[in-house]
Image (tube, rainbow, N blue to C red):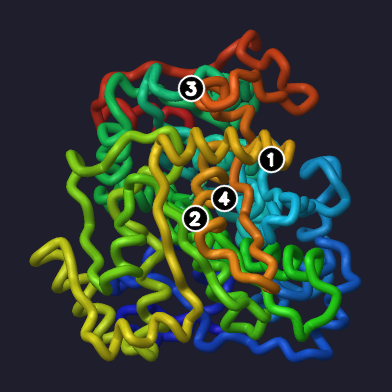
Amino acid sequence: MKYISTRGDRTERGFCDILLEGLAPDGGLYLPVAYPKVDDATLTRWRGLSYAELAFEVLSLYIDDIPADDLRRLVSKTYTAEVFGSEAIVPVRKLGESGLWIEALSNGPTLAFKDMAMQLLGNLFEYELGRRGEELNILGATSGDTGSAAEYAMRGKQGVRVFMLSPNGRMSPFQQAQMFSLQDANIHNIAVEGVFDDAQDIVKAVSNDLAFKRKYKIGTVNSINWARLLAQVVYYFAGYFQVTSKNTEQVSFTVPSGNFGNVCAGHVARMMGLPVKHLVVATNENDVLDEFFRTGSYRVRQGAETHETSSPSMDISKASNFERFVYDLLGRDGERTRHLFHTEISRAGAFTLTGAESGRIGSFGFQSGRSTHVDRLNTIRSTYERFGSLVDTHTADGVKVALERVEAGVPMIVLETALPAKFAETIREAVGVEPERPAGLGDIESLPKRFTVMQPDTDLVKAFVARHCD
Ligand SMILES: *Cc1c(COP(=O)(O)O)cnc(C)c1O
């Protein structure tokens, strides 16, 4: 399989060429030249597979520059019951007779769905860097989930160091403890005296210094990475097989969304032929995506318009993977995609599709809805009382929207993107109970911490990176 950019550069690159890269050189995102189609016989064969075997089957349709035996080994080392808590890896549970199912993507080391892809990325990076005899220094900024998932995926890996900036004192005590308690020599936590945007600005400034970037082999692991998206395609198949018994049945998915990475993987699975009726995008108060699916207008929010909510991992001002879907929606017209995402967004911070363009959205199965803090509290409470199931704040946004969209005869699978233990404060507010923590995490706040506090100064961060690379 070869990969091209969404902005018109049709140079074909292999999977391993784009594995360690972010944006395509023309500023677009990478997508496969075509989606491989999965027929009925293949679906039937895949039904009986373990998660790791299924992951190998899906990935090998997209990766032809890693020998099959190596890929099989990397995948089976990634998706184990030890790391993800059960043989099913992504077990489903039914919410009574509501028509809703919850698919748990959040039983990895950091209790959020980003582990599903990041754990694989860690093993792919180590493998590819080893093959090339190269090193990579991952520099990132986090307000919580992405940074910890990256650190738990890269800890102890050969050839990789992680430098993760976070706003000092602004993450929850649990999130801080998760990250700062890591003692691995290749993991560096930098707590910046400032807010998330200060940390993000430093990462951008360092990445814009091309000489520094090249000399110190700076890379990222953000959600636009194609390998992350691809790893996520697998659990749409795994969820489908768990709630259906034959391939003629359709299901829908509701996905708590921020950067559109998770639901974009659902779009890819559907394009491959998985019988998905609807892909329901659930947002919180940061509703740029819900607005798009209702109106056909995409309007990037300003900093001041971006709300801090109780589902913080969905607090986004723009959806960085969204361009991938729009490219497909526009019949893969790279010029038009470039015009909208480059010209229009730079000029006006927004674009509106033509009537003919937005008329096609329905045929891609997309629907949307939004949720607020009050909805979140009510949904956590009612899901607990009616079904005896405690869900986290992000998943609650999904359940709220899913209940509005569920149809008779079509199972609605809500993706559980984090465990309640990660967002204990809102859980207590909603139901007055303390969410249970998985074994081993009972008292992580009291573990010794390893981190460096720093003024928000790009030169200080560069000096720190340089010092730890020699
Ligand atoms: C990252 C994240 C999301 C949003 O996923 P996107 O791929 O950015 O749409 C939702 N919930 C949780 C818990 C997350 O960590």
Which mark is nearer the camera, 3 or 1? 1
Nearest to N terminus: mark 3 or mark 1: 3
Q: Residues within 10 Å of mark 3 (few under 14, many from 20)?
A: some
- Disc 3 to disc 1, C-alpha distance: 29 Å
Residue 427, by quadrant, is top right
Seen at 64% across and 64% down, the residue is: 412
Per the image, the residue denoted by label 2 is: 401
Give the structural element (helix, strand or loop) at label 4.
helix
* Res 237 visible: yes
Seen at 81% across and 41% down, the residue is: 85
Give the structural element (helix, strand or loop) at label 1.
helix
Residue 182 in the image, given as x and y percentages of width and height = 62, 24
Amino acid bearing label 4: Val
Amino acid bearing label 3: Ser
Amino acid bearing label 1: Arg
Nearest to N terminus: mark 3 or mark 2: 3
Per the image, the residue denoted by label 3 is: 172
Which mark is nearer the camera, 2 or 1? 1
Per the image, the residue denoted by label 4 is: 399
In the rendered structure, are the residues bearing label 3 and label 4 in contact, judged by CB atoms less than 8 Å apart? no
Which mark is nearer the camera, 4 or 1? 1
* Res 64 visible: no
Which of the two residues, 305 or 373, is positioned nearer the viewer here?
373
- Disc 3 to disc 2, C-alpha distance: 26 Å
Per the image, the residue denoted by label 1 is: 386
Residue 180, by quadrant, is top right
